[in-house]
Amino acid sequence: MARNPREDRREESEFVEKLVSINRVAKVVKGGRRFGFAALVVVGDGKGRVGFGAGKAREVPEAIRKATEKARNGVRRVPLREGRTLHHDVKGRFGAGRVVLRAAPPGTGIIAGGPMRAIFECLGMQDVVAKSVGSANPHNMVKATFEALDHVYAPRDVAARRGKKVGQIISRGGEAAEA
């Protein structure tokens, strides 16, 4: 069954794509070196959905295409407070890469390093303070950030899981009563 080209374009425009890193690798063979490329891509809709993917190929565009395809297939939803920041502070780690993500007041902006900044921009997050500790390897930083984002829970979800009201879950330190 042939797909409609308009639907493909609309689907592509739904997601924002950010190329996080390209790595050239060489394999030494009898005739010399054979080069390949590894790409790391983050995609998101700017409304709380984000995913990442890695792709490898002999040519850069093909590596990016593969990474983008994997990223689109691995999109996940992250609950955001007021559509702009995290509900609570969270830590993540992957390998030697560790990240700390903190909720921030309006107007703070995205204070984060390269790979994490790409994730937050694709996610549609506007205010966050993030710090990477340990490995600066982009793959580990991205995976640690996603591991942290997997542990962000909306107060409504926590209240439902515990069988309580949202007001009983949220601290009285000035946070909104409804998430």
Image (cartoon, rainbow, N blue to C red):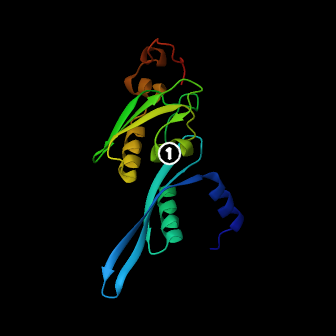
Considering the image in quadrants, where does the N terminus appear? Answer: bottom right
Q: Amino acid at mark 1?
A: Ile
Quadrant position of residue 29: bottom left
- Give the image location of residue 93, x and y in percent: 32, 42
- Give the image location of residue 59, x and y in percent: 49, 74
Mark 1, other Cα within 10 Å: few <14 / some 14–19 / many ≥20: many
Which residue is the extreme one toward the right? 6
At horizontal 65% and vertical 63% (from top left) the residue drawn is 8
At horizontal 44% and vertical 29% (from top left) the residue drawn is 102
Which residue is the extreme one toward the top? 172
Indicate whether 45 appears above or below 107. Answer: below
Between residues 80 and 138, which one lies in front from this camera angle?
138
Q: Secondary structure at mark 1?
A: helix
In the visual, does 88 lie left or right of 124?
left
Indicate whether 9 appears above or below 93. Answer: below
At horizontal 28% and vertical 48% (from top left) the residue drawn is 95
- Give the image location of residue 118, x and y in percent: 51, 47
Indicate whether 81 appears above or below 66. Answer: above
- Give the image location of residue 44, x and y in percent: 55, 48
Return the residue at label 1. Answer: 119
Answer whether residue 54 is visible to the viewer in this image.
Answer: yes
